[in-house]
Image: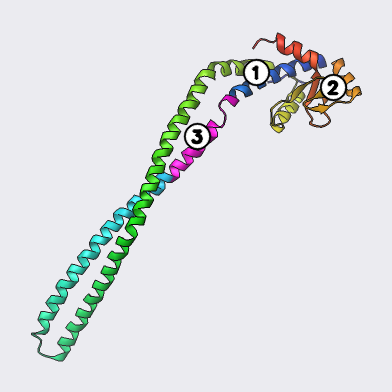
Amino acid sequence: MATTAHEHSIHDQLIALIRLQHIDSKIDQIKKLRGDLPDEIRDMEDEMEGLSTRLEKLQQEQKDNDVAKKQAENDVKDAEGLIKKYEEQQLQVRNNREYDALTKEIEAQKQRIVDATAKGEEIVLSKPLHDASVDEASARLTEIKEVLGQKTGELNEVLQNTKSEQAGLEKTRKKAEKEVDDRYLRAYARLRSRVRDGRAVVPLERGAAAGFSVPPQRQLEIRQRNRIVACEHTGRIVVDGALFDETTTGFKL
Protein backbone atom coordinates (compact mmCIF):
# COMPACT_ATOMS: atom_id res chain seq x y z
CA MET A 1 0.00 0.00 0.00
CA ALA A 2 1.24 3.51 -0.78
CA THR A 3 1.94 6.04 1.93
CA THR A 4 -0.65 8.58 3.01
CA ALA A 5 -0.62 12.09 1.55
CA HIS A 6 1.89 14.71 2.76
CA GLU A 7 4.27 12.12 4.29
CA HIS A 8 6.88 12.93 1.64
CA SER A 9 8.13 16.18 0.17
CA ILE A 10 7.13 17.07 -3.38
CA HIS A 11 10.72 16.51 -4.48
CA ASP A 12 10.62 13.01 -3.02
CA GLN A 13 7.32 12.40 -4.75
CA LEU A 14 8.70 13.49 -8.10
CA ILE A 15 11.58 11.04 -7.74
CA ALA A 16 9.21 8.27 -6.62
CA LEU A 17 6.92 8.88 -9.59
CA ILE A 18 9.84 8.91 -12.02
CA ARG A 19 11.08 5.60 -10.62
CA LEU A 20 7.63 4.06 -10.85
CA GLN A 21 7.25 5.23 -14.43
CA HIS A 22 10.71 3.92 -15.28
CA ILE A 23 9.79 0.48 -13.95
CA ASP A 24 6.43 0.45 -15.71
CA SER A 25 8.06 1.47 -18.99
CA LYS A 26 10.45 -1.48 -18.68
CA ILE A 27 7.53 -3.82 -18.01
CA ASP A 28 5.68 -2.34 -21.00
CA GLN A 29 8.71 -3.05 -23.19
CA ILE A 30 8.66 -6.69 -22.12
CA LYS A 31 4.95 -6.97 -22.84
CA LYS A 32 5.52 -5.33 -26.21
CA LEU A 33 7.84 -8.19 -27.14
CA ARG A 34 4.79 -10.44 -27.06
CA GLY A 35 3.21 -8.23 -29.70
CA ASP A 36 -0.22 -9.36 -30.82
CA LEU A 37 0.53 -13.01 -30.04
CA PRO A 38 -1.81 -13.27 -27.01
CA ASP A 39 -4.73 -11.74 -28.96
CA GLU A 40 -3.98 -13.84 -32.04
CA ILE A 41 -3.87 -17.00 -29.94
CA ARG A 42 -7.19 -16.17 -28.26
CA ASP A 43 -8.81 -15.48 -31.64
CA MET A 44 -7.54 -18.76 -33.06
CA GLU A 45 -8.68 -20.70 -30.00
CA ASP A 46 -12.16 -19.21 -30.39
CA GLU A 47 -12.23 -20.04 -34.11
CA MET A 48 -10.96 -23.55 -33.44
CA GLU A 49 -13.69 -24.12 -30.86
CA GLY A 50 -16.34 -22.90 -33.32
CA LEU A 51 -14.94 -25.05 -36.13
CA SER A 52 -14.80 -28.13 -33.90
CA THR A 53 -18.47 -27.68 -33.02
CA ARG A 54 -19.37 -27.14 -36.69
CA LEU A 55 -17.37 -30.17 -37.80
CA GLU A 56 -19.01 -32.39 -35.20
CA LYS A 57 -22.42 -31.20 -36.38
CA LEU A 58 -21.58 -31.80 -40.05
CA GLN A 59 -20.20 -35.26 -39.33
CA GLN A 60 -23.31 -36.15 -37.33
CA GLU A 61 -25.45 -34.94 -40.24
CA GLN A 62 -23.43 -37.22 -42.54
CA LYS A 63 -24.19 -40.19 -40.31
CA ASP A 64 -27.86 -39.23 -40.09
CA ASN A 65 -28.06 -38.90 -43.88
CA ASP A 66 -26.46 -42.31 -44.36
CA VAL A 67 -29.03 -43.82 -42.01
CA ALA A 68 -31.88 -41.95 -43.73
CA LYS A 69 -30.68 -43.08 -47.18
CA LYS A 70 -30.52 -46.69 -46.03
CA GLN A 71 -33.98 -46.34 -44.50
CA ALA A 72 -35.33 -44.93 -47.79
CA GLU A 73 -33.87 -47.88 -49.70
CA ASN A 74 -35.43 -50.30 -47.22
CA ASP A 75 -38.78 -48.49 -47.51
CA VAL A 76 -38.72 -48.93 -51.30
CA LYS A 77 -37.91 -52.64 -51.02
CA ASP A 78 -40.55 -53.13 -48.33
CA ALA A 79 -43.18 -51.26 -50.37
CA GLU A 80 -42.34 -53.24 -53.51
CA GLY A 81 -42.75 -56.47 -51.57
CA LEU A 82 -46.12 -55.37 -50.20
CA ILE A 83 -47.35 -54.28 -53.65
CA LYS A 84 -46.50 -57.72 -55.04
CA LYS A 85 -48.28 -59.34 -52.11
CA TYR A 86 -51.42 -57.19 -52.48
CA GLU A 87 -51.54 -57.75 -56.25
CA GLU A 88 -51.44 -61.51 -55.69
CA GLN A 89 -54.23 -61.18 -53.11
CA GLN A 90 -56.35 -59.24 -55.61
CA LEU A 91 -56.40 -62.33 -57.81
CA GLN A 92 -58.07 -64.25 -55.01
CA VAL A 93 -60.68 -61.78 -53.73
CA ARG A 94 -64.40 -62.65 -53.90
CA ASN A 95 -65.92 -59.16 -54.07
CA ASN A 96 -65.28 -55.60 -55.20
CA ARG A 97 -64.97 -54.25 -51.66
CA GLU A 98 -61.96 -56.45 -50.89
CA TYR A 99 -60.46 -55.64 -54.29
CA ASP A 100 -60.86 -51.88 -53.76
CA ALA A 101 -59.34 -52.12 -50.28
CA LEU A 102 -56.26 -53.85 -51.69
CA THR A 103 -56.09 -51.27 -54.48
CA LYS A 104 -55.90 -48.50 -51.86
CA GLU A 105 -53.11 -50.36 -50.08
CA ILE A 106 -51.22 -50.72 -53.35
CA GLU A 107 -51.60 -47.00 -54.08
CA ALA A 108 -50.38 -46.16 -50.59
CA GLN A 109 -47.28 -48.30 -51.08
CA LYS A 110 -46.62 -46.73 -54.49
CA GLN A 111 -46.76 -43.30 -52.86
CA ARG A 112 -44.42 -44.61 -50.19
CA ILE A 113 -41.98 -45.58 -52.95
CA VAL A 114 -42.25 -42.11 -54.52
CA ASP A 115 -41.59 -40.40 -51.19
CA ALA A 116 -38.71 -42.69 -50.24
CA THR A 117 -37.12 -42.38 -53.68
CA ALA A 118 -37.35 -38.58 -53.54
CA LYS A 119 -35.79 -38.60 -50.08
CA GLY A 120 -32.94 -40.81 -51.24
CA GLU A 121 -32.29 -38.65 -54.31
CA GLU A 122 -32.29 -35.53 -52.17
CA ILE A 123 -29.66 -37.03 -49.89
CA VAL A 124 -27.54 -38.15 -52.86
CA LEU A 125 -27.71 -34.71 -54.48
CA SER A 126 -26.77 -32.90 -51.25
CA LYS A 127 -23.90 -35.26 -50.40
CA PRO A 128 -21.16 -33.60 -52.56
CA LEU A 129 -21.85 -30.15 -51.10
CA HIS A 130 -22.11 -31.56 -47.59
CA ASP A 131 -18.88 -33.54 -47.98
CA ALA A 132 -17.14 -30.40 -49.30
CA SER A 133 -18.25 -28.50 -46.18
CA VAL A 134 -16.82 -31.25 -43.99
CA ASP A 135 -13.52 -31.25 -45.89
CA GLU A 136 -13.29 -27.46 -45.75
CA ALA A 137 -13.96 -27.30 -42.00
CA SER A 138 -11.56 -30.18 -41.36
CA ALA A 139 -8.79 -28.59 -43.44
CA ARG A 140 -9.24 -25.21 -41.75
CA LEU A 141 -9.20 -26.86 -38.32
CA THR A 142 -5.95 -28.65 -39.17
CA GLU A 143 -4.45 -25.39 -40.43
CA ILE A 144 -5.45 -23.47 -37.31
CA LYS A 145 -4.07 -26.17 -35.02
CA GLU A 146 -0.74 -25.99 -36.82
CA VAL A 147 -0.54 -22.18 -36.74
CA LEU A 148 -1.78 -22.11 -33.14
CA GLY A 149 1.00 -24.49 -32.16
CA GLN A 150 3.57 -22.22 -33.79
CA LYS A 151 2.16 -19.05 -32.20
CA THR A 152 1.93 -20.68 -28.78
CA GLY A 153 5.53 -21.83 -29.11
CA GLU A 154 6.65 -18.31 -30.01
CA LEU A 155 4.77 -16.82 -27.07
CA ASN A 156 6.11 -19.42 -24.65
CA GLU A 157 9.65 -18.66 -25.81
CA VAL A 158 9.17 -14.94 -25.21
CA LEU A 159 7.59 -15.59 -21.82
CA GLN A 160 10.39 -17.94 -20.84
CA ASN A 161 13.06 -15.43 -21.85
CA THR A 162 11.42 -12.55 -19.99
CA LYS A 163 9.80 -14.36 -17.09
CA SER A 164 12.52 -13.77 -14.50
CA GLU A 165 13.13 -10.19 -15.64
CA GLN A 166 9.44 -9.30 -15.41
CA ALA A 167 9.10 -10.99 -12.02
CA GLY A 168 12.02 -8.93 -10.73
CA LEU A 169 10.51 -5.73 -12.09
CA GLU A 170 7.12 -6.51 -10.56
CA LYS A 171 8.81 -7.03 -7.20
CA THR A 172 10.71 -3.75 -7.53
CA ARG A 173 7.51 -2.02 -8.60
CA LYS A 174 5.72 -3.00 -5.39
CA LYS A 175 8.48 -1.39 -3.37
CA ALA A 176 8.51 1.74 -5.54
CA GLU A 177 4.73 2.04 -5.30
CA LYS A 178 4.96 2.34 -1.52
CA GLU A 179 7.03 5.49 -1.90
CA VAL A 180 4.23 7.31 -3.74
CA ASP A 181 1.50 9.07 -1.77
CA ASP A 182 -1.99 7.69 -2.35
CA ARG A 183 -3.43 10.69 -4.17
CA TYR A 184 -0.52 10.83 -6.62
CA LEU A 185 -0.60 7.07 -7.08
CA ARG A 186 -4.29 7.20 -8.00
CA ALA A 187 -3.66 10.04 -10.44
CA TYR A 188 -0.72 8.15 -11.92
CA ALA A 189 -2.82 5.01 -12.41
CA ARG A 190 -5.59 7.00 -14.11
CA LEU A 191 -3.11 8.63 -16.46
CA ARG A 192 -1.47 5.30 -17.29
CA SER A 193 -4.81 3.85 -18.32
CA ARG A 194 -5.67 6.88 -20.48
CA VAL A 195 -2.51 7.44 -22.50
CA ARG A 196 -1.67 5.07 -25.34
CA ASP A 197 2.04 4.68 -24.59
CA GLY A 198 1.55 4.27 -20.84
CA ARG A 199 3.76 7.25 -20.00
CA ALA A 200 2.07 9.14 -17.19
CA VAL A 201 5.32 10.88 -16.17
CA VAL A 202 7.34 12.59 -18.92
CA PRO A 203 10.48 14.77 -18.87
CA LEU A 204 10.66 18.38 -19.97
CA GLU A 205 13.08 18.47 -22.89
CA ARG A 206 13.88 21.51 -25.04
CA GLY A 207 10.76 23.31 -23.88
CA ALA A 208 8.38 20.46 -24.66
CA ALA A 209 6.93 17.36 -23.03
CA ALA A 210 5.59 14.33 -24.92
CA GLY A 211 5.51 16.35 -28.12
CA PHE A 212 3.67 19.37 -26.73
CA SER A 213 5.16 22.80 -26.12
CA VAL A 214 5.29 23.97 -22.49
CA PRO A 215 4.91 27.73 -21.71
CA PRO A 216 8.02 29.41 -20.21
CA GLN A 217 6.31 30.06 -16.86
CA ARG A 218 5.36 26.39 -16.55
CA GLN A 219 8.89 25.39 -17.51
CA LEU A 220 10.21 27.47 -14.62
CA GLU A 221 7.79 25.83 -12.18
CA ILE A 222 8.81 22.38 -13.41
CA ARG A 223 12.54 23.10 -13.05
CA GLN A 224 12.03 24.29 -9.46
CA ARG A 225 10.96 20.73 -8.59
CA ASN A 226 8.61 21.81 -5.83
CA ARG A 227 5.28 21.22 -7.56
CA ILE A 228 3.48 18.41 -9.35
CA VAL A 229 2.84 20.00 -12.75
CA ALA A 230 0.44 18.50 -15.29
CA CYS A 231 0.67 19.04 -19.04
CA GLU A 232 -2.08 21.38 -20.23
CA HIS A 233 -2.64 19.25 -23.33
CA THR A 234 -2.38 15.65 -22.13
CA GLY A 235 -2.67 15.79 -18.35
CA ARG A 236 0.62 13.89 -17.99
CA ILE A 237 2.89 14.74 -15.07
CA VAL A 238 5.80 16.77 -16.42
CA VAL A 239 9.10 16.67 -14.52
CA ASP A 240 12.44 18.41 -14.95
CA GLY A 241 14.44 16.63 -17.65
CA ALA A 242 17.65 16.69 -15.63
CA LEU A 243 15.90 15.18 -12.61
CA PHE A 244 14.34 12.51 -14.83
CA ASP A 245 17.75 11.56 -16.26
CA GLU A 246 19.47 11.60 -12.86
CA THR A 247 16.77 9.41 -11.32
CA THR A 248 16.51 6.83 -14.10
CA THR A 249 20.28 6.62 -14.62
CA GLY A 250 21.01 6.11 -10.97
CA PHE A 251 18.10 3.77 -10.31
CA LYS A 252 19.14 0.14 -10.56
CA LEU A 253 16.39 -2.26 -11.62
State the image coordinates of residue 137 (x, y, percent, origin top left). 40, 46
User: What is the number of the mark on residue 41?
Assistant: 3
Q: Quadrant of residue 153?
A: top left
**Direction from residue 161 to residue 207 in the image, left or right:** right
Q: Is residue 178 at all visible to an observer of this figure?
A: no
Q: In this view, does 204 lie above or below 99?
A: above
**Direction from residue 99 to residue 43 in the image, left or right:** right
Q: Which amino acid does label 2 sit on?
A: Gly
Secondary structure state at the residue bearing disc 2: loop
Which residue: 62% across, 22% down?
29
Q: Is residue 248 at all visible to an observer of this figure?
A: yes
Q: Which of marks 2 and 3 is in front?
A: 2
Which residue: 71% across, 10% down?
249
Q: Which amino acid does label 1 sit on?
A: Arg
Hey, which residue is sitting farthest left in the picture? Answer: 92
State the image coordinates of residue 162 (x, y, percent, origin top left). 54, 19
User: What is the number of the mark on residue 173?
Assistant: 1
Q: Which of marks 1 and 3 is in front?
A: 3
Which residue: 44% across, 42% down?
49
Q: Is residue 118 above or below residue 195?
A: below
Secondary structure state at the residue bearing disc 3: helix
Secondary structure state at the residue bearing disc 1: helix
Q: Give the range drawn in magenta.
A: 31-50
What kind of secondary structure does the magenta stretch mostly adopt?
A: helix
Q: Nearer the viewer, residue 234 or 89?
A: 234
Q: Name the residue under label 2.
A: 207
Q: Do the CB atoms of the residues marked 1 and 2 lie less than 8 Å apart?
A: no
Q: Which amino acid does label 3 sit on?
A: Ile
